[in-house]
């Protein structure tokens, strides 16, 4: 379990994260959502101990997280937005280098490498250097590297940024399989479809503050399960309804190009951003 209490990070006079309180259960797939500058990456930075809190604390299974507790830190692995791997190394070399950083026995490194490359569908490409891998393969290799030390918590900061639609879906399937093994996953993403498909709960953040924690379906139901899109001279205007009959009744009352569809988490984000998140 991850317990975040009064977590605050200031950079001089700027408060990037402001008194954040939340609990993430063991084995949960949890999302951090918000516009650019909401404090998501800073929060991930503090959870990875790359950044130190100005105030507050983070507890992992009841223990306070700090740089002075390497055993606790080892429970956490991070996958960043940027590709942080040497371009001239092969997959095997990347994995062995990572294992040696954690003082793992060479035999164990090679056994885990075999298992993880097989799991991620990368074995046949293991002799390629990083520069010869596709974007999707690089992301999968970063997952393999992060899992090498058998972490209990995986922090993902925009893990599918820049990936094509097929590679993104493959990554989703991979992350679901990991979560099914009781791995706790904390995800930041700008892809609302990703959060809706993967996360059991999400936290909405803005300007460093926590706005709300809910399930994706709970947020959608609060806005209205059905959406009617109407094309106007000013662009597409959407209205939301809790009952299908209400949406159909509204459709019958207007003319022009319209569409009835299910509401998505992206609709929630856009509506919240338009009102007060931004």
Image (cartoon, rainbow, N blue to C red):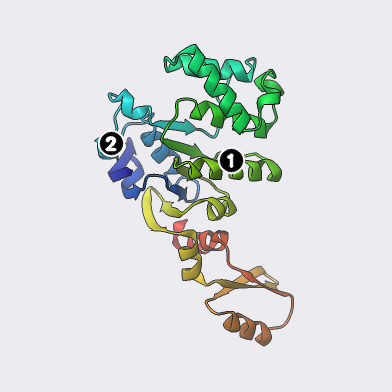
Q: Residue 131, position in %: x, y? A: 68, 21
Q: Which residue is nearer to you in this view: 137 or 237?
A: 137
Can residue 229 be seen here? yes
Indicate the secondary structure of the residue bearing disc 2.
loop
Give the residue displayed 54% in from the left and 20% down from the top.
111
The residue carrying pointer 1 sits among few (fewer than 14), some (14 to 19) or many (20 or more) residues within 10 Å by Cα, namely some
Can residue 83 be seen here? no
The label number, if any, that marks residue 174 in the structure image: 1
The label number, if any, that marks residue 84 in the structure image: none
Q: Which residue is nearer to you in this view: 158 or 94?
A: 94
Give the residue displayed 47% in from the left and 51% down from the top.
34
Give the residue displayed 69% in from the left and 45% down from the top.
165
The residue carrying pointer 2 sits among few (fewer than 14), some (14 to 19) or many (20 or more) residues within 10 Å by Cα, namely some
The answer to which image quadrant residue 119 occupies is top right
Q: Which residue is nearer to you in this view: 139 or 121?
A: 121
The answer to which image quadrant residue 266 occupies is bottom right
Q: CA distance from mark 1 to mark 2?
A: 35 Å
Location of the N terminus (image quadrant)? top left
Q: Which residue is nearer to you in this view: 244 or 96?
A: 96
Q: Residue 229, position in %: x, y? A: 65, 71
The residue at which mark 2 appears reads as 54
């Amino acid at each position: 379990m991850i317990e975040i209490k009064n977590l605050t990070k200031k950079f001089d006079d700027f408060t990037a994260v402001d008194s954040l309180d939340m609990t993430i259960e063991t084995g949960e797939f949890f999302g951090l959502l918000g516009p650019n500058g909401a404090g998501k990456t800073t929060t991930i930075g503090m959870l990875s101990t790359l950044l130190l809190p100005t105030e507050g604390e983070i507890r992992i299974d009841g223990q306070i997280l700090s740089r002075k507790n390497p055993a606790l830190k080892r429970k956490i692995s991070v996958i960043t937005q940027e590709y942080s791997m040497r371009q001239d190394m092969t997959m095997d070399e990347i994995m062995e280098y990572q294992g040696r950083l954690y003082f793992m026995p060479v035999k164990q490194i090679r056994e885990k490498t075999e298992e993880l490359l097989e799991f991620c569908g990368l074995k046949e490409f293991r002799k390629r250097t990083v520069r010869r891998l596709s974007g999707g393969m690089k992301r999968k290799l970063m997952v393999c590297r992060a899992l090498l030390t058998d972490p209990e918590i995986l922090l993902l900061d925009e893990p599918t940024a820049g990936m094509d639609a097929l590679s993104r879906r493959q990554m989703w399937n991979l992350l679901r399989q990991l979560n099914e093994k009781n791995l706790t996953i904390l995800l930041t993403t700008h892809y609302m479809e990703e959060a809706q498909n993967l996360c059991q709960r999400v936290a909405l953040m803005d300007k460093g503050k926590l706005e709300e924690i809910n399930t994706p379906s709970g947020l959608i139901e609060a806005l209205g399960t059905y959406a009617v899109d109407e094309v106007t001279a000013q662009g597409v205007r959407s209205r939301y309804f809790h009952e299908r009959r209400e949406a159909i009744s509204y459709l019958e009352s207007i003319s022009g190009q319209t569409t009835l569809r299910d509401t998505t988490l992206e609709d929630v984000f856009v509506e919240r951003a338009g009102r007060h998140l931004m």
